[in-house]
Image: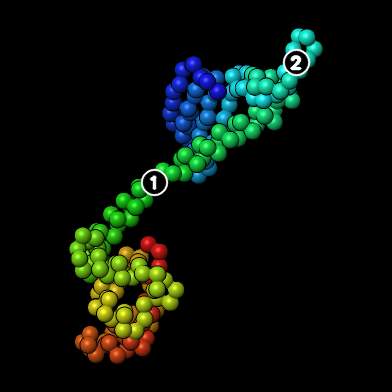
């Protein structure tokens, strides 16, 4: 398909959603965002003779042969037209699937980096440029802890304090048993004395942020 006509893109925002249309001469491909939850892609063509396909060509002398010729406007050309437009849709889907959308990541980063207030106590946000915060985040994201969580000695060496543990849970990075959390809240012993209980009972389970 060698296009010598106008090429352009049109963007419209409608009541039912957003539409992006790319047109190249008489051929266009459109992407609809219906109600913000359904993605629809369709291709249209006002003049199918712009496509050249291999088909049987009848000559005036009564002979025929197979060669590339303009697509005929006939019901028998529907399959070839369908194949061409379907391939265009798949190529467009493959193209847009290569985009990286960082908007959700920026939103989550903003959430976890801000301080939170809960039960008359402030829990600071995480600073991904702080070496201590970064080392803890890298430690809990290791694959070896994804199935059974962080248990025993690794938990005490990685987390270091209950306040940091609670900070992780508030920010949605992890969860741990309520009975263990009640133990930390009611005990007035030092962290050193808690380590024996920690080694036996803690089950720090990583969850997807």
The residue at the far right in this view is 62
Q: Is residue 113 above or below residue 43?
A: below
Residue hosting label 1: 100
Q: Image quadrant of residue 8?
A: top left
Foreground of the two, 133 or 165: 133
**Badge 2 element:** strand
Question: Who's the residue at 46% across and 40% down the image?
Answer: 96
Other residues around mark 2 within 10 Å, as few (<14) / some (14–19) / many (≥20): few
The image shows a total of numbered marks equal to: 2
Give the label, 2 or 1, closer to the camera: 2
Residue 91, disc: none
Foreground of the two, 88 or 122: 88
**Badge 1 element:** loop
Disc with the residue nearer the chain's start (2 vs 1): 2
Q: Left or right of 70: which side holds 6?
A: left
Question: Who's the residue at 27% across and 76% down the image?
Answer: 159
Foreground of the two, 44 or 110: 44
Residue hosting label 2: 58
Question: Who's the residue at 37% across and 62% down the image?
Answer: 209
Q: Left or right of 118: which side holds 55?
A: right
Q: Is residue 205 visible?
A: no
Q: Is residue 157 above or below residue 128?
A: below
Q: Is residue 110 above or below residue 8?
A: below
Foreground of the two, 87 or 21: 87
Other residues around mark 1 within 10 Å, as few (<14) / some (14–19) / many (≥20): few
């Amino acid at each position: 398909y060698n296009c010598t006509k106008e090429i352009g893109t049109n963007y419209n925002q409608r009541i039912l959603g957003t539409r992006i249309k790319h047109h190249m001469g008489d051929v266009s491909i459109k992407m609809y965002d219906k109600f913000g939850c359904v993605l629809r892609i369709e291709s249209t063509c006002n003049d199918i003779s712009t496509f050249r396909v291999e088909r049987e060509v009848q000559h005036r002398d009564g002979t025929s042969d197979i060669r590339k010729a303009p697509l005929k406007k006939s019901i028998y050309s529907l399959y070839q037209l369908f194949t061409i437009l379907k391939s265009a849709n798949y190529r467009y889907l493959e193209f847009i699937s290569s985009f990286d959308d960082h908007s959700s990541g920026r939103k989550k980063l903003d959430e976890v980096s801000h301080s939170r207030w809960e039960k008359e106590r402030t829990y600071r946000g995480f600073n991904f440029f702080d070496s201590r915060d970064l080392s803890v985040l890298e430690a809990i994201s290791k694959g070896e802890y994804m199935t059974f969580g962080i248990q025993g000695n690794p938990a005490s060496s990685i987390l270091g304090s209950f306040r940091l543990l609670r900070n992780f849970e508030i920010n949605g990075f992890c969860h741990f048993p309520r009975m263990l959390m009640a133990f930390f809240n009611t005990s007035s012993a030092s962290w050193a004395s808690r380590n024996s209980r920690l080694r036996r009972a803690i089950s720090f389970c990583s969850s997807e942020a």
